[in-house]
Image: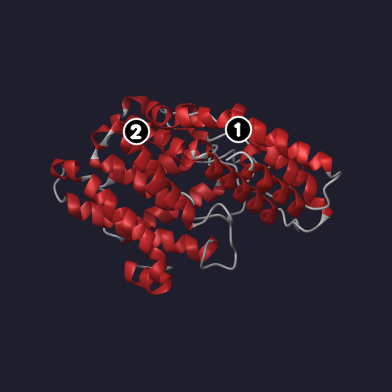
Amino acid sequence: MELPDVAAARRLAGERLQALDQALAERHAQLAPLLSTQADADVLLERCADAIRIAYVRLARRHGSLSDDFHAYHNEEHILDILRDRISRLIAIHGVLALGLRDWCVLHLFAGCHDLRQREESMYEAGVGSNERASIEETFRLLDHTGFSRDADADIYQALELTIAGSTFDARPPPGGAAFNAAELVQSGGALAAKLARKLDKHRPGWRDDAGLLHAHDLALIAADLDTANVAEPFARFATSAENLCLEREMLCRRDLETPESAQPVLGFLTDGQDRFFFDLHRFNSELGRQAFGAAKDANASRLKSLSLGLRARIAMHGRPESGRQVLKAYCETVAGLV
Protein backbone atom coordinates (compact mmCIF):
# COMPACT_ATOMS: atom_id res chain seq x y z
CA MET A 1 0.00 0.00 0.00
CA GLU A 2 1.31 3.45 -0.94
CA LEU A 3 2.29 5.39 2.24
CA PRO A 4 0.81 2.72 4.51
CA ASP A 5 1.04 4.64 7.77
CA VAL A 6 1.53 8.05 9.34
CA ALA A 7 5.23 7.40 9.99
CA ALA A 8 5.83 6.88 6.26
CA ALA A 9 3.78 9.98 5.46
CA ARG A 10 5.81 12.06 7.92
CA ARG A 11 9.10 10.80 6.52
CA LEU A 12 8.06 11.91 3.05
CA ALA A 13 6.26 15.16 3.86
CA GLY A 14 8.25 16.49 6.81
CA GLU A 15 7.28 20.06 7.67
CA ARG A 16 4.54 20.04 5.04
CA LEU A 17 2.32 18.27 7.59
CA GLN A 18 2.54 21.07 10.14
CA ALA A 19 -0.45 23.04 8.89
CA LEU A 20 -2.61 19.93 8.84
CA ASP A 21 -1.41 18.81 12.27
CA GLN A 22 -2.29 22.20 13.71
CA ALA A 23 -5.73 22.17 12.10
CA LEU A 24 -6.45 18.67 13.44
CA ALA A 25 -5.31 19.60 16.95
CA GLU A 26 -7.49 22.71 16.98
CA ARG A 27 -10.47 20.75 15.71
CA HIS A 28 -9.98 18.06 18.37
CA ALA A 29 -10.20 20.81 20.99
CA GLN A 30 -13.32 22.23 19.37
CA LEU A 31 -14.99 18.83 19.46
CA ALA A 32 -14.36 18.43 23.20
CA PRO A 33 -18.05 18.96 24.14
CA LEU A 34 -18.91 15.86 22.09
CA LEU A 35 -16.26 13.50 23.44
CA SER A 36 -18.49 12.21 26.22
CA THR A 37 -21.15 11.18 23.69
CA GLN A 38 -19.20 8.19 22.43
CA ALA A 39 -17.06 5.52 24.01
CA ASP A 40 -13.43 5.63 22.87
CA ALA A 41 -14.00 9.05 21.29
CA ASP A 42 -10.31 9.93 21.43
CA VAL A 43 -9.45 6.68 19.65
CA LEU A 44 -12.00 7.48 16.94
CA LEU A 45 -10.59 10.96 16.41
CA GLU A 46 -7.02 9.69 16.27
CA ARG A 47 -7.92 7.06 13.68
CA CYS A 48 -9.69 9.76 11.71
CA ALA A 49 -6.66 12.05 11.95
CA ASP A 50 -4.28 9.28 10.86
CA ALA A 51 -6.38 8.52 7.78
CA ILE A 52 -6.50 12.21 6.86
CA ARG A 53 -2.74 12.66 7.30
CA ILE A 54 -2.01 9.73 5.01
CA ALA A 55 -4.54 10.95 2.43
CA TYR A 56 -3.06 14.45 2.58
CA VAL A 57 0.44 13.23 1.80
CA ARG A 58 -0.78 10.82 -0.86
CA LEU A 59 -2.49 13.69 -2.66
CA ALA A 60 0.59 15.89 -2.24
CA ARG A 61 2.70 13.12 -3.75
CA ARG A 62 0.33 12.53 -6.66
CA HIS A 63 -0.81 16.01 -7.63
CA GLY A 64 0.51 18.54 -5.12
CA SER A 65 3.69 19.97 -3.67
CA LEU A 66 5.53 16.61 -3.82
CA SER A 67 4.45 15.72 -7.34
CA ASP A 68 5.67 16.05 -10.91
CA ASP A 69 1.99 15.97 -11.97
CA PHE A 70 0.90 19.17 -10.23
CA HIS A 71 -2.81 20.01 -10.26
CA ALA A 72 -3.33 23.68 -9.44
CA TYR A 73 -6.71 23.09 -7.76
CA HIS A 74 -7.02 19.41 -6.81
CA ASN A 75 -4.02 19.16 -4.49
CA GLU A 76 -3.49 18.91 -0.72
CA GLU A 77 -4.32 22.59 -0.19
CA HIS A 78 -7.91 21.84 -1.17
CA ILE A 79 -8.06 19.48 1.82
CA LEU A 80 -7.08 22.34 4.13
CA ASP A 81 -9.58 24.66 2.45
CA ILE A 82 -12.39 22.36 3.53
CA LEU A 83 -11.12 20.83 6.75
CA ARG A 84 -9.57 23.91 8.32
CA ASP A 85 -11.46 26.85 6.86
CA ARG A 86 -14.91 25.82 5.68
CA ILE A 87 -15.73 23.37 8.45
CA SER A 88 -14.56 26.04 10.90
CA ARG A 89 -17.14 28.36 9.33
CA LEU A 90 -19.80 25.69 9.72
CA ILE A 91 -18.94 25.32 13.40
CA ALA A 92 -18.77 29.09 13.95
CA ILE A 93 -22.28 29.56 12.56
CA HIS A 94 -24.03 26.46 13.91
CA GLY A 95 -21.94 25.34 16.88
CA VAL A 96 -20.24 22.03 17.39
CA LEU A 97 -23.45 20.46 18.75
CA ALA A 98 -25.20 20.88 15.38
CA LEU A 99 -23.88 17.46 14.37
CA GLY A 100 -22.74 14.34 16.18
CA LEU A 101 -19.12 13.39 16.71
CA ARG A 102 -19.24 10.69 14.04
CA ASP A 103 -20.83 13.16 11.61
CA TRP A 104 -17.94 15.56 12.07
CA CYS A 105 -15.57 12.65 11.50
CA VAL A 106 -17.32 11.86 8.21
CA LEU A 107 -17.00 15.46 7.02
CA HIS A 108 -13.33 15.56 7.98
CA LEU A 109 -12.64 12.27 6.22
CA PHE A 110 -14.54 13.55 3.19
CA ALA A 111 -12.29 16.63 3.13
CA GLY A 112 -9.21 14.45 3.23
CA CYS A 113 -10.21 11.68 0.85
CA HIS A 114 -12.77 12.80 -1.73
CA ASP A 115 -10.18 13.85 -4.32
CA LEU A 116 -7.60 11.11 -3.74
CA ARG A 117 -7.83 9.95 -7.37
CA GLN A 118 -7.66 12.39 -10.28
CA ARG A 119 -6.35 10.45 -13.25
CA GLU A 120 -8.94 7.67 -13.68
CA GLU A 121 -10.28 6.90 -17.14
CA SER A 122 -13.70 8.47 -17.57
CA MET A 123 -16.58 6.06 -17.05
CA TYR A 124 -20.24 6.96 -16.56
CA GLU A 125 -22.06 4.70 -14.12
CA ALA A 126 -25.12 5.76 -12.10
CA GLY A 127 -23.90 9.34 -12.22
CA VAL A 128 -20.78 8.68 -10.16
CA GLY A 129 -17.49 9.75 -11.72
CA SER A 130 -14.59 7.36 -12.14
CA ASN A 131 -12.34 9.57 -10.00
CA GLU A 132 -14.92 9.56 -7.23
CA ARG A 133 -15.53 5.83 -7.48
CA ALA A 134 -11.81 5.14 -7.23
CA SER A 135 -11.51 7.60 -4.34
CA ILE A 136 -14.29 5.75 -2.48
CA GLU A 137 -12.51 2.45 -2.94
CA GLU A 138 -9.19 3.86 -1.78
CA THR A 139 -10.84 5.58 1.18
CA PHE A 140 -12.33 2.29 2.30
CA ARG A 141 -8.93 0.59 2.10
CA LEU A 142 -7.39 3.46 4.03
CA LEU A 143 -10.02 3.22 6.76
CA ASP A 144 -9.46 -0.52 6.99
CA HIS A 145 -5.75 0.08 7.41
CA THR A 146 -6.10 2.78 10.10
CA GLY A 147 -8.24 0.75 12.48
CA PHE A 148 -11.82 1.31 11.33
CA SER A 149 -14.15 -1.67 11.09
CA ARG A 150 -16.59 -2.23 8.24
CA ASP A 151 -18.99 -3.71 10.81
CA ALA A 152 -18.64 -1.43 13.83
CA ASP A 153 -18.15 1.67 11.67
CA ALA A 154 -20.56 0.76 8.89
CA ASP A 155 -22.25 4.16 9.25
CA ILE A 156 -19.00 5.97 8.48
CA TYR A 157 -18.24 3.84 5.42
CA GLN A 158 -21.79 4.29 4.15
CA ALA A 159 -21.75 8.04 4.66
CA LEU A 160 -18.37 8.39 2.94
CA GLU A 161 -19.62 6.43 -0.03
CA LEU A 162 -22.49 8.88 -0.49
CA THR A 163 -20.54 12.04 0.31
CA ILE A 164 -17.73 11.26 -2.13
CA ALA A 165 -20.14 10.04 -4.81
CA GLY A 166 -22.19 13.20 -4.35
CA SER A 167 -19.17 15.38 -5.07
CA THR A 168 -19.17 14.16 -8.70
CA PHE A 169 -19.55 16.92 -11.27
CA ASP A 170 -21.30 15.33 -14.25
CA ALA A 171 -19.56 12.04 -14.96
CA ARG A 172 -20.87 11.74 -18.53
CA PRO A 173 -18.19 11.59 -21.24
CA PRO A 174 -18.02 14.95 -23.04
CA PRO A 175 -19.38 15.15 -26.62
CA GLY A 176 -17.14 14.64 -29.60
CA GLY A 177 -14.85 12.14 -27.93
CA ALA A 178 -12.96 14.78 -25.95
CA ALA A 179 -11.05 13.67 -22.89
CA PHE A 180 -12.80 14.07 -19.54
CA ASN A 181 -11.48 17.07 -17.63
CA ALA A 182 -11.91 17.00 -13.85
CA ALA A 183 -11.51 20.79 -13.69
CA GLU A 184 -14.31 21.44 -16.20
CA LEU A 185 -16.88 22.17 -13.50
CA VAL A 186 -18.57 24.98 -15.39
CA GLN A 187 -19.52 22.72 -18.28
CA SER A 188 -21.29 20.22 -16.04
CA GLY A 189 -24.71 20.05 -14.51
CA GLY A 190 -23.39 20.76 -11.03
CA ALA A 191 -22.71 18.39 -8.18
CA LEU A 192 -24.42 14.98 -8.17
CA ALA A 193 -25.52 15.66 -4.57
CA ALA A 194 -28.44 17.71 -5.86
CA LYS A 195 -29.71 14.65 -7.76
CA LEU A 196 -28.55 12.02 -5.29
CA ALA A 197 -32.02 11.26 -3.91
CA ARG A 198 -33.31 10.50 -7.40
CA LYS A 199 -30.29 8.31 -8.12
CA LEU A 200 -30.90 6.39 -4.90
CA ASP A 201 -34.58 5.98 -5.79
CA LYS A 202 -33.46 4.29 -9.00
CA HIS A 203 -30.52 2.23 -7.78
CA ARG A 204 -31.40 1.54 -4.12
CA PRO A 205 -35.19 1.27 -3.93
CA GLY A 206 -36.50 1.53 -0.38
CA TRP A 207 -33.58 3.63 0.84
CA ARG A 208 -35.97 6.19 2.32
CA ASP A 209 -37.00 3.58 4.89
CA ASP A 210 -33.40 3.18 6.05
CA ALA A 211 -32.57 5.72 8.76
CA GLY A 212 -28.85 5.24 8.22
CA LEU A 213 -29.05 5.97 4.51
CA LEU A 214 -31.28 8.98 5.13
CA HIS A 215 -28.69 10.39 7.50
CA ALA A 216 -25.84 9.60 5.10
CA HIS A 217 -27.74 11.45 2.38
CA ASP A 218 -28.08 14.50 4.64
CA LEU A 219 -24.33 14.46 5.24
CA ALA A 220 -23.70 14.18 1.49
CA LEU A 221 -25.62 17.42 0.96
CA ILE A 222 -23.51 19.19 3.59
CA ALA A 223 -20.30 17.77 2.13
CA ALA A 224 -21.21 19.02 -1.35
CA ASP A 225 -21.74 22.50 0.07
CA LEU A 226 -18.35 22.40 1.76
CA ASP A 227 -16.70 21.27 -1.47
CA THR A 228 -18.11 24.14 -3.53
CA ALA A 229 -18.02 26.88 -0.88
CA ASN A 230 -15.15 28.59 -2.70
CA VAL A 231 -17.99 30.77 -4.06
CA ALA A 232 -18.28 32.16 -0.52
CA GLU A 233 -14.60 32.76 0.15
CA PRO A 234 -13.31 36.32 0.57
CA PHE A 235 -13.34 37.63 -3.00
CA ALA A 236 -9.58 37.50 -3.61
CA ARG A 237 -9.49 33.85 -2.51
CA PHE A 238 -12.54 33.04 -4.61
CA ALA A 239 -10.88 34.62 -7.63
CA THR A 240 -7.67 32.67 -6.97
CA SER A 241 -9.62 29.41 -6.81
CA ALA A 242 -11.09 30.19 -10.26
CA GLU A 243 -7.59 30.94 -11.56
CA ASN A 244 -6.30 27.62 -10.18
CA LEU A 245 -9.18 25.72 -11.74
CA CYS A 246 -8.39 27.42 -15.03
CA LEU A 247 -4.71 26.47 -14.79
CA GLU A 248 -5.61 22.86 -14.02
CA ARG A 249 -8.14 22.75 -16.84
CA GLU A 250 -5.61 24.00 -19.40
CA MET A 251 -2.99 21.57 -18.11
CA LEU A 252 -5.40 18.65 -18.47
CA CYS A 253 -6.33 19.85 -21.96
CA ARG A 254 -2.61 19.94 -22.78
CA ARG A 255 -2.83 23.52 -23.97
CA ASP A 256 0.28 25.66 -23.63
CA LEU A 257 -0.57 28.93 -21.88
CA GLU A 258 2.10 30.69 -23.93
CA THR A 259 0.38 29.94 -27.25
CA PRO A 260 -2.52 31.70 -29.04
CA GLU A 261 -4.62 28.52 -28.87
CA SER A 262 -5.09 28.94 -25.12
CA ALA A 263 -6.24 32.57 -25.18
CA GLN A 264 -9.93 32.13 -25.95
CA PRO A 265 -10.45 29.03 -23.76
CA VAL A 266 -8.90 30.85 -20.79
CA LEU A 267 -10.94 33.99 -21.40
CA GLY A 268 -14.13 31.97 -21.78
CA PHE A 269 -13.51 30.02 -18.59
CA LEU A 270 -12.77 33.12 -16.51
CA THR A 271 -15.79 35.08 -17.78
CA ASP A 272 -18.76 33.15 -19.19
CA GLY A 273 -17.69 29.93 -17.47
CA GLN A 274 -17.41 31.39 -13.99
CA ASP A 275 -20.60 33.39 -14.43
CA ARG A 276 -22.49 30.27 -15.48
CA PHE A 277 -21.21 28.21 -12.59
CA PHE A 278 -21.76 30.91 -9.96
CA PHE A 279 -25.18 32.17 -11.06
CA ASP A 280 -26.76 29.22 -12.89
CA LEU A 281 -25.28 25.92 -11.74
CA HIS A 282 -24.20 26.39 -8.15
CA ARG A 283 -26.81 25.89 -5.44
CA PHE A 284 -26.40 25.12 -1.76
CA ASN A 285 -27.92 21.71 -1.08
CA SER A 286 -28.28 21.76 2.72
CA GLU A 287 -29.78 24.26 5.11
CA LEU A 288 -26.62 24.17 7.22
CA GLY A 289 -24.55 25.03 4.16
CA ARG A 290 -26.90 27.75 3.00
CA GLN A 291 -26.91 29.44 6.38
CA ALA A 292 -23.13 29.20 6.75
CA PHE A 293 -22.12 30.30 3.26
CA GLY A 294 -25.09 31.85 1.48
CA ALA A 295 -24.61 35.44 2.61
CA ALA A 296 -20.91 35.42 1.73
CA LYS A 297 -21.71 34.06 -1.74
CA ASP A 298 -24.29 36.81 -2.24
CA ALA A 299 -21.67 39.37 -1.26
CA ASN A 300 -19.40 38.08 -4.04
CA ALA A 301 -22.04 38.29 -6.76
CA SER A 302 -21.67 41.94 -7.74
CA ARG A 303 -17.88 41.74 -7.66
CA LEU A 304 -17.90 38.70 -9.93
CA LYS A 305 -20.05 40.60 -12.44
CA SER A 306 -17.61 43.51 -12.23
CA LEU A 307 -14.68 41.14 -12.66
CA SER A 308 -16.13 39.57 -15.81
CA LEU A 309 -17.00 42.96 -17.32
CA GLY A 310 -13.67 44.45 -16.30
CA LEU A 311 -11.66 41.56 -17.73
CA ARG A 312 -13.51 41.74 -21.06
CA ALA A 313 -12.95 45.50 -21.19
CA ARG A 314 -9.27 45.18 -20.34
CA ILE A 315 -8.80 42.57 -23.06
CA ALA A 316 -10.76 44.64 -25.61
CA MET A 317 -8.52 47.65 -24.99
CA HIS A 318 -5.48 45.71 -26.16
CA GLY A 319 -7.05 43.74 -29.00
CA ARG A 320 -7.14 40.00 -29.47
CA PRO A 321 -5.11 38.33 -26.68
CA GLU A 322 -1.95 36.59 -27.80
CA SER A 323 -1.99 33.81 -25.19
CA GLY A 324 -3.73 32.36 -22.21
CA ARG A 325 -0.92 33.73 -20.06
CA GLN A 326 -1.76 37.25 -21.22
CA VAL A 327 -5.41 36.70 -20.29
CA LEU A 328 -4.42 35.44 -16.84
CA LYS A 329 -2.24 38.51 -16.31
CA ALA A 330 -5.16 40.76 -17.21
CA TYR A 331 -7.41 38.72 -14.91
CA CYS A 332 -5.09 39.19 -11.92
CA GLU A 333 -4.82 42.90 -12.63
CA THR A 334 -8.61 43.19 -12.75
CA VAL A 335 -8.98 41.29 -9.47
CA ALA A 336 -6.44 43.57 -7.82
CA GLY A 337 -8.55 46.56 -8.78
CA LEU A 338 -11.61 45.09 -7.07
CA VAL A 339 -10.17 44.13 -3.66
Across and down, in percent, residue 25 comes to 27, 55
Pick whichever, 33 or 131, lies toward us: 33
**Residue flagged by tag 1: what amino acid is it?**
Arg
Please state, as top left, top right, bottom left or bottom right, where the N terminus lies in the image: bottom left
Pick whichever, 144 or 70, lies toward us: 70
Q: Residue at x 61, y 53 (%)?
A: 121
Query: Which of disc 2 and disc 1 is earlier in sequence?
Result: 2
Q: Is residue 98 above or below residue 261?
A: above
Q: Is residue 181 above or below residue 198?
A: below
* Residue 182 appears anywhere in the view: no
Pick whichever, 176 or 50, lies toward us: 50
Q: Circle 1 is placed at which residue position?
A: 303
* Residue 59 appears anywhere in the view: yes
In space, the residues marked 1 and 2 are separated at their CA atoms by 39 Å
Q: Residue at x 52, y 65 (%)?
A: 65
Across and down, in percent, residue 327 comes to 74, 48
Across and down, in percent, residue 82 comes to 42, 46
Secondary structure at badge 1 equals helix
**Residue flagged by tag 2: what amino acid is it?**
Leu
Q: How is the image coloured?
A: secondary structure
| Numbered mark located on residue 213 in the image | 2
Residue count near mark 1 (Cα–Cα under 10 Å), binned few <14, some 14–19, many ≥20: some
Asked if the residue at tag 2 contacts the one at tag 1, i.e. Cβ–Cβ closer than 8 Å, the answer is: no
Residue 125: quadrant of the picture: top right
Side of 142 relative to 263 (left or right): left
Q: Residue at x 38, y 74 (%)?
A: 11
